[in-house]
Amino acid sequence: LLLGVILLSHVFGRVWCGWVCHLGAFQEFLFQTNKLKFLNRKKIKKALKWTRYVLFITLILQLLFTRENLYVHIDPFKAVFNLSSYYLTGWILLAILLISSVYIYRPFCQGVCPVGLVLSWIDKIPGASLIQINSNCKTCGSCQKACPNDAIQAVALSEEKIQVNSDCIMCGNCLDSCKKDGLDFGRR
């Protein structure tokens, strides 16, 4: 299944994360506009990104040493979708997920999801499909404001050039917001 998702992501971009994943959809359903502005800072986003790498390495090491996925016993999504968890940790993680999903856009995706992390590496492969800024871009910033995942950033210190990074989940909000057709699908 994972190989199929990787192939899908190479051909169409990270549509799995943006359009198919039920875990992301659940978090998006709960998300409200950022009422707590301090949770929207770059430092929080960077910490979530590093947390995802640390947890991914921990998961790989745990799988190598125990040969069993211990995470399935405390998975908060298992608790929410099956309405059962045999461990208190699963319920605690669910409470954290529910509360954080109200204030942070897709906190599990940004801070934990190993599938999203692997799929973010796919757009580095030649021929990968991704959203790109084209020559029609007037650097108005409407795409950057419309991106809920902060995947569109100004390059370096200059506001005159914008780029889409590997956090793009192909939600399409940027395409809808751009009045100048400054974005399109392309290949690396």
Image: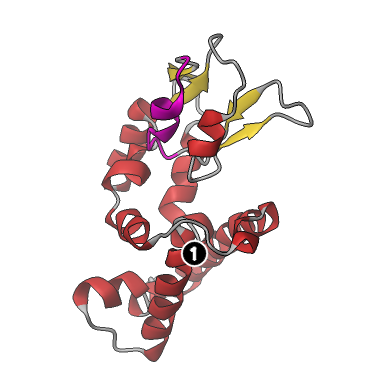
Instruction: Please state if 80 lies on the left or on the right of 45 as rendered.
Output: left
Front residue of 115/139: it is 139
Task: Kindly identify the residue that appears in the image at 31 percent across and 60 percent down.
Answer: 26
Task: Kindly identify the residue that appears in the image at 34 percent across and 37 percent down.
Answer: 15
Identity of the residue furthest to the right in this view: 157
Identity, as a three-letter code, of the amino acid under mark 1: Tyr
* SS for dot 1: helix
The x, y position of residue 128, in whole percent, is 44, 25
How many marks can you see?
1
Local crowd size for mark 1, using a 10 Å CA cut-off: few (<14), some (14–19), many (≥20): some
Whether residue 102 is visible, yes or no, is: yes
The x, y position of residue 148, in whole percent, is 48, 45
The residues colored magenta run 169-180
Residue corresponding to mark 1: 103
Front residue of 148/58: it is 148
The x, y position of residue 137, in whole percent, is 56, 15
